[in-house]
Image (tube, rainbow, N blue to C red):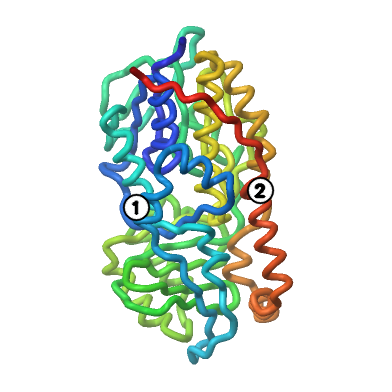
Amino acid sequence: MKNTNVLISGASIGGPALAYWLNRYGFSVTVVERAPSLRKGGQAIDFKGDTHRTVLERMGIWDEIHKRQTGGKDQTIIDADERPLATIPGEFTGGDVEIRRGDLSELLYEITSDECEYIFGDSITSVVDTPDGVDVTFVNGEPRRFDLVVGADGIHSNTRRLAFGPESDYVKFLGHYYALADLGIDSDAVMYNEPGRMAALGGPKSPAFFVFASDKSDANRMDVKEQKEFLRAAYQGGAWRIGELMERIPEAEEFYMDAIARVHMDEYARGRVALLGDAAYGNTLGGFGTGLAMVGAYVLAGELMLADGDHETAFSQYQEKFRGYAKIAKQGTAGSFLAPGSRLKMLMRNWTFKANFLLGLMMKMTDKFATDIELEDYPSQWRG
């Protein structure tokens, strides 16, 4: 087999999942991650339907995910006086099984770190695609040559920028920002809305969650202190417990904020460089990102194995087989759903959770999207 030396950028979900499958098929894998260590915590992510389960079972981690699951629970939409307005069922937000992003990342690292090389605290600075390989330079490490490079480094993918072009060519801002903050508040799972902004609490292990409408800004390039002030300004004058939550924001040790955006790409590969997960087909908070990354890793690695390392054939097949499944990432925006722009839109959103037939229709649609691919049963080829 040729092209067996692969560099993956990104050690969150898609990168380690791809590392698992490539190592299983006999590839030599290096994973580089900008962060100094695995990112812990984060929002809950979920898996739903037979497609997700099949991939996770073939990886041998379905049972372990259940052991680490958060146990998706109902969330109550409340008014400023904490009177219930509607209930979002746990099976709607939590799928068949729900797990914290950081817990899944840790699990994937555990099953790959003995066989794959991980480099933390470093990042790619250039990729030069040649007929015989990819010459890669790093911020800290020495230059190296790899046969193939895969960017699994999120919606703001550095790999995509270097190999395909600027982010502005591929990522569309959708009018909202979101933030996660560990505020140390023990609360029932509740969500409160005012026009254009949402605040949610979900229990002692869950970060506070905020979504708010905003014009596009340079918030992504702010430091954490500036981001916190940006968030506080967006929630100024809010009712319910907004004032209390905003007072806690400056001291939050775990804090993350980003724009809600969507990736638009016609191709997921160019030359010897391919993209996976949010880097190729991201839609922030769209509800399918983790499943797309895990199934995409399975398909990409399987096609490389079937093609005996021929990247042109494998990348072409990956795009052909996956483009239809990834189309869900091009639809909808979580921002307007979680933070409706008017009280009428808030009422209409809440009503969908009271009308059983509408909720049932939404559940069926998500199940259909989650299973809308025919999985290849790639033969197991263990290194040995």
Residue designated by label 1? 103
Q: Residue 285 at what x, y percent from top left?
A: 54, 56
Q: As displayed, is residue 320 above or below residue 231?
A: above
Assign a secondary structure to mark 1.
helix
Decide: few, some or many residues near mark 1? Use Cα within 10 Å; few <14, some 14-19, many ≥20.
many
Q: As displayed, is residue 163 above or below residue 369?
A: above
Tell me the amino acid under the disc marked 1.
Asp
Find residue 343 and report its image quarter.
Answer: bottom right
Instruction: Give the Cα separation between the discs numbered 1 and 2.
Output: 25 Å
Give the residue at x 51% y 20%: 305
Assign a secondary structure to mark 2.
helix
Q: Which mark is residue 328?
A: 2
- Is 167 left, or right, of 107 in this rendering? right
Q: Residue 288 at what x, y percent from top left?
A: 57, 51
Q: Quick one: quadrant of the C terminus?
A: top left
Give the residue at x 52% y 69%: 90
- Is 242 left, or right, of 328 in this rendering? left
Q: Residue 375 at what x, y percent from top left?
A: 61, 35
